[in-house]
Amino acid sequence: MGYIAHIDTWRTTLKSHPDELTGDMIDRLEKEVDMLERHLQVLRMVIDSEPIGIVKMSNETGYPHHKVRYSLRVLEEENLIEPSSQGAITTEQTHEFVDELDEKLNDIVGKLDEMKIEEAAEVEG
């Protein structure tokens, strides 16, 4: 399963019981997942279309320039991309990161699944 599909699984898990999942912790987790999804979409665009600039990424994703710029900065700090005069390009670390990403996301999805409280285990009211 690809990393975007894993993020969709997380989102489904978080939104499947909206009245039960209203705490601040869940809200923060959902925001982090949304941001991770954006970072990974930007990384995918760099991998597929390098070199690629902010304007093209913004136009193709619908994200505002400042959000694309922030994602690029995060990816650069992680040494997954680097700037060039024509736009963002991948680094030597990019492919290793991508190779390990599915396994890491599987681990996280597994942990989230383990956190579920089944209806049978809920306290009866």
Image (tube, helix red, strand yellow):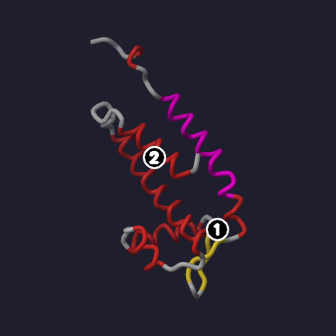
- Residue corresponding to mark 2: 8
Q: Is residue 10 above or below residue 34?
A: above
Image height check: is 83 above or below 24?
A: below
At which x and y percent is residue 98?
65, 57
Q: Residue at x 37, y 17 (%)?
A: 122
Quadrant of the rendering where the N terminus is positioned: top right
Residue at x-position 46% and y-position 42%: 10
- Say whether residue 116 is magenta: no
Residue 22 locus on image (x, y percent): 30, 37
Q: Main secondary structure of the magenta part?
A: helix
Q: Which mark is in front, 2 or 1?
A: 2
Q: Quadrant of residue 60?
A: bottom left
Callout 2 environment at 10 Å: few (<14), some (14 to 19), or many (20+)?
Answer: some
Give the CA separation, mark 2 to mark 1.
Answer: 26 Å
Whichever of callouts 2 and 1 sits on the residue coming sooner in the sequence is 2
Please name the residue that numbered disc 1 is placed on: 79
Q: Is residue 46 above or below residue 100?
A: below
What crowding class fits label 1: few (fewer than 14 Cα within 10 Å), some (14-19), or many (20 or more)? some
Magenta residue check for 106: yes
| Pick the front one: 7 or 60 | 60
Q: Quadrant of the C terminus?
A: top left
Q: Is residue 92 above or below residue 125?
A: below
Residue 51: which quarter of the image?
bottom right
Q: Front-most of 38 and 32?
A: 38
User: Measuring 49% from the left and 55% from the top, which residue is drawn there?
Assistant: 36
For residue 37, side relative to residue 21 (left or right): right
Q: Residue furthest top?
A: 124
Classify mark 2: helix, strand or loop.
Answer: helix
- What span is colored magenta in the figure? 97-115
Name the spot of residue 101 as percent of width and height, x first. Answer: 63, 51
